[in-house]
Image (tube, grey):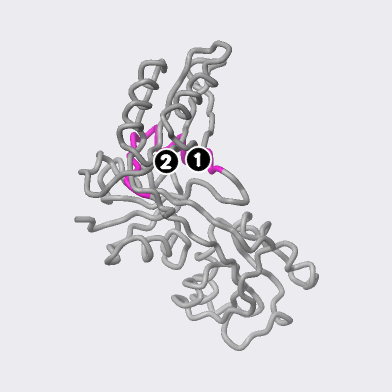
Amino acid sequence: MIDKVGIQGIKGSFHHQVVEQYYTSTPEMLECRTFDALARAVAEGDCDQAVMAIENSIAGSILPNYALMDQYDLVISGEHYLSIDHNLMALAGQKIEDIKEVHSHPMALLQCKKFFLNYPHIKLVESDDTAEEAFKISKDKTKAKGAIAGHRAAEIYGLDILSASIQTIKNNITRFVIVQKHVPEQQQKISKASWKFVLDHKRGSLATALNVMSDCNLNLTKIQSLPVIETPGKYAFFVDVTFGDPLDYSKAKSLLEIMSTAFKVLGEYKSGKS
C-alpha cells in the first residue's frame, strides 16, 4: 500500500501530473524543493515512493539524478513517460500584450524561446520551478506577469492559459522513474531493468559487455557513464535494457556480474512503453 509519494516541486508540477497518471488512486504527496531532498526523503522513510525525472527527449539525461539514486541506494520499481506541454499562463482577464515578464525554469524558457521572439516586449526571467511561479502569481494576484507551466498548474491556481503548447519542439517527452527504498515484491511481469556496472579499464571491455547483452537478446535502450570518484580513469556505466524472455535476461545478468568489477541492479520493472 502506497500512502505517501514524494515529488520534486509542488502541486501542478510535471511530477505531480505523473503521480495523477501513474497511480490508480492519488496518494498523499510530499513536496520537495530539490532532487537531493527528494532522494533523502525516500531513503529516510519520509515517503513510500518518489517520482523522479531521469531523462528528457530534448535535453537528454539528468545526470545528477543517476548519482542520487546510486548514493541513496534507491530502487526503481516503475517508470512513466509524460508528454511535456509548456503553456503561457497569467491572471484571468489579461492578454499577452499586457504581460511584461514571464518567469519559469531555465529549461522551460529555453524550450519556448522561439515563441517569445514574436513578443520582444516580454522579459524572460529564470526561476527554480515552473508550477511555483504559477502559484506565486495566483497568491500575490500579480498582473503583467506570466508563468510557463503545465496545464494542471493553471487549473489548480486559477490562471488563464494565454497560449498553449508553446514549446518549439512539440514531441517533448520526459521519462520519470518511480523509486523506493527496498526491492518491491514481484507483482507484475518485468520487461525492463536498470543496471550499474564497472568494468576493468582495458581495451574492449565495454564492447564485450555490450555483445553479451546482444547475444542474450536484450535491447539496450539507454547507456550513460559517470566517473568513479574513488578511482580516477574508471567509469561506471548505467544502462537500461528491455527483454521478452526472463531466461535471456537472467543469463545476461549472470554473465555481467562475473565480468564486472562491481555490478548493481538499480531496478527490475515493467516497461512504461507498450
Residue assigned mark 2:
242
Residue 63 position within the rendered picture, expressed as x and y whole percent measured from the top left: 53, 38
| Residue type beneath disc 1 | Thr
- Residue nearest the viewer, comparing 71 with 219: 219
Mark earlier in primary sequence (1, 2): 1
Secondary structure beneath disc 1? strand
Would you say the residues marked 1 and 2 are in contact, meaning their CB atoms lie under 8 Å apart? yes
Give the quarter of the image for residue 85: bottom right
Tell me, for residue 116, which label it has, or none.
none
Residue 245 drawn above or below residue 258: below
Residue furthest bottom as drawn: 93
Tell me the CA gap for discs 1 and 2. Answer: 7 Å
Residue 55 position within the rendered picture, expressed as x and y whole percent measured from the top left: 52, 47
Left or right of 211: which side holds 169? right
At x 27%, y 57%, the residue is 4
Range drawn in magenta: 61-78
